[in-house]
Amino acid sequence: MDEATRVLLVEDEPGDARLVMALLKQARFDRFEISVAIRLQEALERTRDLSFDAVLLDLSLPDSHGMETIRVFRREAPDLPIIVLTGLADREVGLQAMKEGCQDYLVKGHGDGETIARAVLHSIQRKRLESDLFRAKEEYRSLVDALPDAILLCTRNELLPVNEAARLLCRDVSHLRGREFPSLVASRDAAKVGTLIGEVLGGARRSGVVEARVRSCEGGLTEAEIVVLAVGHDSGPAAEVIVHDLTARREADHFRTLASTVFEGSAEAMIVTDASTRIRMVNAAFTEITGYRPEDVIGLTPHVLSSGKHSQEFYKEMWRTLLTSGHWRGDIWNRRKNGEVYVQRLTISAIRGYGGTVENFVGVFSDVTEQRQREDVARHRAFHDVLTGLPNRALLQDRLEQALTQARRRRGGLAVLFLDLDGFKPVNDQYGHQVGDELLRRVAERLRDHVRETDTVARIGGDEFVILLTNVTDRFSVDRAAGSILRALAQPVPVGDITVTVGVSIGIATFPEAGSDPAELIANADKAMYLAKRYGKGAYCHFPVEDDDVA
């Protein structure tokens, strides 16, 4: 069953109240639930405590009379539709009541229940329509006030601001009255603006657009697009003038031009992809470095540049870093269109749009192949012996520290072999430094040939070499390596047109028995080497030395 229409009947005459209630109950098309109040104050209290759909209001009450009754009721219950109950001689009062905001009036004693019911229901509907219209107007007003564009109404006699932006444009509203809009425009633009507004007001055209510099009451000038539209108005011809500030557009255009200039003019290659890494844009430097023209790569992925030198793990880590931090920087080997492999110094940035979703990736890179080559040469010179190409003392120290860390972690062993050539000085003195240098190079080659790839052969000065043996399991394996080296260097060495013979004395220090840090191990291996020389050269000796340790 439909809910009853709740009506508050404000009537201090019991007979009149009973009559209205009886008539409403006769209505066949609706059901009414009626509450009665005999005073205005009582009625107002009822409306605070209970919800009503409409009020039937008598204007002659013990505590209120006439139009003031309506005003008080509307102030206290503005959303409640009011139907005034008036006497036969008070029709003018009823009409006046409607001007005060009532939805309808009824003459007491006239009309049946259907008439009263229709009046109540129609009043409720009219009130709802009024409320909806009011809300729509308020929403429209809020929308217009929220617009960034200034909107003004221009007639032949005055200029009125319509929204907040228009009031801010001119600051002092009264300052606008009676002024023509062209007076707000820079003097050089006033004529074209005035002509457009005059044509719209005169009916020669319905709308038009011009660009001009608008002058605010503070005296500043702003570039604006001025739209003039013909509108209806009670006082006659009128035009709506919309002022759209072009500052943001001009700045956006400027930055677009600037970005385009930077993009195309950059000495660094630039590549822009979509979220799925399909290439959308490349610049001239990209073509210069890679050899690929835009039409070669647009729609493809950057994989087209891949050199194959990097593992899948490398790329997985790259993307993990990029998506986590938004950036990735590093050097990467790629391939030019002609097949040449080169080194890029690359920065990739993820560009996020609305909601934080990645929309683009931007890569900026330069060719650093020559720089990397120079760096590699400098790094090699810093850590390698110039004559033999073997690691020098600094690189030996670093590798020995790493090997000790691994040995401690795995509880393994390692050995340091200190080598000094036997008979090198006589060869150097007899045949000269060139032969001596070549001899050292040949010795370095033999030493490299007689150790594992995981071991290190270093030259630390003159005719002294150090060999680092890693993953040593027992003393026997160290002795076997030392013996192999002795036999290799005991063989004659061809140097140019001559053949020379030298030997070698070897001192051995193993971890952890002979030391626990690089300096201690090298020093003890050096001591053991001098003991090997003392026992007749061409031999090796362990530290600490026992009489039967020399072989």
Image: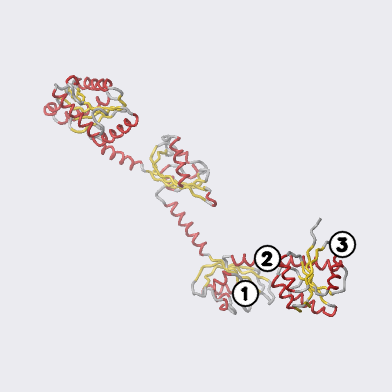
Q: CA distance from mark 1 to mark 2?
A: 26 Å
Q: Which mark is residue 268?
A: none
Report which quarter residue 463 is drawn in: top left
Which residue sits at x=41%, y=35%?
Answer: 309
Q: Earlier in the sequence, mark 1 or mark 2?
A: 2
- State the residue position of label 1: 154
Tell me the kind of residue under disc 2: Arg
**Mark 3–mark 2 CB contact (< 8 Å):** no
> Which label number is shown at residue 28?
3
Mark 1: amino acid? Cys
Quick one: 240 or 538, which is closer to the camera? 538
Which tag is nearer the camera, tag 1 or tag 2?
Answer: 2
Residue 438 sits in quarter: top left
Q: Which residue lies at the image location 67% right of the left edge and 75% below the top edge? A: 237
Which residue, given by chain and number where applicable, does mark 2 sit on? 135
Disc 3 element: loop
The local crowd at label 2, few if under 14, some if 14 to 19, many if 20 or more residues have their Cα within 10 Å, is few
